[in-house]
Image: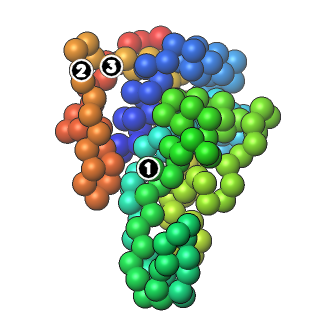
Amino acid sequence: SDVYKRQWYLVSQSERVRKKFHAELDARGAPKTYQDVRGLTVTRTIIEETLRLYPPVPMLGRQALADAKVGKTHIKKGSLVLVSPFMLQRKDALFSMPNHFIPERFDDAHATRPEKYEYVPFAVGPRICPGLTFGQTEAIICMAKLGSRFDPVLAPGQNVQEQCRLTLRPGETLPMQLVRR
């Protein structure tokens, strides 16, 4: 999945995060059971921060259920309203240094979690992605298992540019090299 590619890319670009990630895996090991996932805080925060920076669906369309006012804009019932998680989750007013990869902002022990409508990589409300919990758990397990054996490194000379189709993706390819740990 494109989210998996992006998390490896972001970790490969931050020596500080990479060291914390490997330290967690060296101390805890790759998860063997579902219960082991809870202890992988650094791994979880990497995934959540990746989803903040690069939500899978960068634009959500919704229909206004009633007349409303958003800022200075009047919205009539039935109007199409577009919400951009990509832009929302990069607002200075909501996140300090919003364009930087800082997984610690999702560490419950050191930070306040974003409000319900500030972090919406899988939408929110009645149309939230039904696979949210499964997908995040799967991502933690896969990242920990792979990261306990390998250190993915971006291939030299790569220029990563985001492409937006229906989903947000890191171009046609994201060449990563696996270095055995």
Mark 1 vs mark 2, foreground winner is 1
* Residue at horizontal 43 percent and vertical 20 percent from the top: 12
Label 3 crowding class (10 Å Cα cut-off): few <14, some 14-19, many 20+?
many
Q: Which mark is residue 158?
A: 2
Amino acid type at mark 2: Gln
Residues under labels 3 and 1: Cα distance?
A: 23 Å
Amino acid type at mark 1: Phe
Work out whether mark 3 precedes mark 1 in sequence or the reverse, and give the earlier one: 1
Counting from the top left corner in percent of width and height, residue 177 is at: 31, 18
* Residue at horizontal 35 percent and vertical 43 percent from the top: 2
Label 2 crowding class (10 Å Cα cut-off): few <14, some 14-19, many 20+?
few
Label 1 crowding class (10 Å Cα cut-off): few <14, some 14-19, many 20+?
many
Q: Where 148 sits versus 114, above or below?
A: above
* Pointer 3 residue: 154
Mark 2 vs mark 3, foreground winner is 2
* Residue at horizontal 71 percent and vertical 40 percent from the top: 38
* Pointer 1 residue: 86
Q: Where 137 sits versus 171, above or below?
A: below
Counting from the top left corner in percent of width and height, residue 55 is at: 44, 49
Q: Name the foreground residue: 144 vs 127.
A: 127
Residues under labels 1 and 2: Cα distance?
A: 23 Å
Work out whether mark 1 precedes mark 2 in sequence or the reverse, and give the earlier one: 1
Amino acid type at mark 3: Leu
Quadrant assignment for the N terminus: top left
Can see residue 40?
Answer: no
Counting from the top left corner in percent of width and height, residue 22 is at: 58, 17
The secondary element bearing badge 2 is classed as loop
Counting from the top left corner in percent of width and height, residue 73 is at: 49, 72
Q: Name the foreground residue: 112 vs 18.
A: 112
- Find residue 175 and report its image quarter: top left
